Amino acid sequence: MDNKIKIVKSNKSWIESNAVEQLIKVTNLEGVLKGVGLPDLHAGKTPAGASFITKDIIYPHIIGNDIGCGMGIFSTGIKKNKFKLDKIIKKLDGLNGIENISIEDFLEKTHLPFKEKLGTIGGGNHFAELQEIDEVYDNEELDSISMNKSIIYLLVHSGSRSYGESILRKFIEDYSCQDGLYIGSDAFNKYMADHERALEFAKLNRELIAYRILKAIGAKDNQKILDSVHNGISKKEIDSQEHYIHRKGTAPSDEGCVIVAGSRGTKSYIVKPYENLYDYAFSISHGSGRKWSRFGCKEKLENMYSKKSVRQNKLVYNLIYKDKSVVYEEAPEAYKNIENVIEDMVNENMIKVVASLNPLITYKV
DNA sequence: ATGTCC
């Protein structure tokens, strides 16, 4: 295999051949210097769990529609021993959707388009989840990001909703952007300006989702601890030259601590990436990646378990949802093993583990 | 992924 391509995996982590083929195809596009598949690599329209370094050109289609998608972690200020699980579930379940909590004051201040989508989680793998710290592996790092074992935290995974979608669609129609945009061209400048606003939208979206949930549960605090984008393009100076890192479902390794999310039935991890990971396109896994495609999840799970146990498996968690299909499509079994993903990255000297978190309540649409 | 597709 070409040394332009790297796949991070051990014998334990299985990667479908289709995803590897997609990784090779994208890496062979003009101007791509490096293509990296992380342990959660899986197939999509373009490979997910993959990063690419380019020079002189960018490819919007690698990023796809959800420009700016990422994860934010917020402090609830609620002490673990004061957290009444049943009461919080009732509060969230009784809302009939977090959209009922007004964010008018915030919306008045913003000039972003698709305002009506701000503060909404969206579908697919997006969620908000209350978590408790399970194990601390590095007290010093945990302190440095102001996290505390006795506090309950909120993890929000969402993106730019219809706004990012509209940007991608416009570029496919107007610029045939599958062919890439040359640095400095009008199309490039326009895309990067839109991309920047989509990042702003997605970040604000995560903050407003957190505001709504924290308000709903009567949280005392609303402090953002970490926020990282795992779908986007960032400029990076490498050897005094301008390069572009394309991340599709991968978190940055050069912005400090990152949350690596498990599925709703497994732990999540706070990790600290090591610096200068050029060989890994300055990226780490953002989560545990799909093992099963959405199609067929329901049948597989119904063959494995009773209906009741589909909802209540593995760790103690509680799921609040509107659409029944998420129970199957986002089941922990449909995802790769997060511990293997973490272990693979530790073995490659990409990260050190700071802490693990257990899911308490998962909120989905 | 998406007020999508049925």
Image (cartoon, coloured by chain):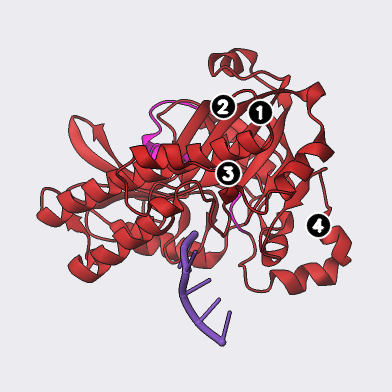
Chain colours: A red, B purple
Q: Amino acid at mark 3?
A: Ile
Pinpoint the chain carrying mark 2.
Answer: A
SS for callout 1: loop
SS for callout 4: helix
Tag 3 or tag 1, which sits nearer the N-term?
3
Q: Position of residue A113 (x, y in %)?
A: 32, 52
SS for callout 3: loop
User: Real-space Cα distance between discs 1 and 3?
Assistant: 14 Å
Asked if badge 3 and badge 2 are on a common chain, one would say: yes
Tag 2 or tag 3, which sits nearer the N-term?
3
Asked if badge 2 and badge 1 are on a common chain, one would say: yes
Q: Residue at x 37, y 54 (%)?
A: A114
- How would you rate the neighbour count of disc 3 (Cα within 10 Å): few for under 14, some for 14-19, many for 20 or more? some
Q: Quadrant of residue A87?
A: top right
Q: Is residue A55 visible?
A: yes
Position of the N terminus of chain A by quadrant: bottom left
Q: Position of residue A228 (x, y in %)?
A: 46, 36
Highlighted range, magenta? A273-290
In this figure, which residue is indicated by the disc labeled 3?
A: A101
Q: Amino acid at mark 1?
A: Ala
Q: Are marks 2 and 1 in contact (CB under 8 Å)?
A: yes
Q: Quadrant of residue A101?
A: top right
Residue nearest the observer in this picture, A272 or A225? A225
Q: Which is closer to the viewer, label 1 or label 3? A: 3
Q: Which mark is residue A219?
A: 1
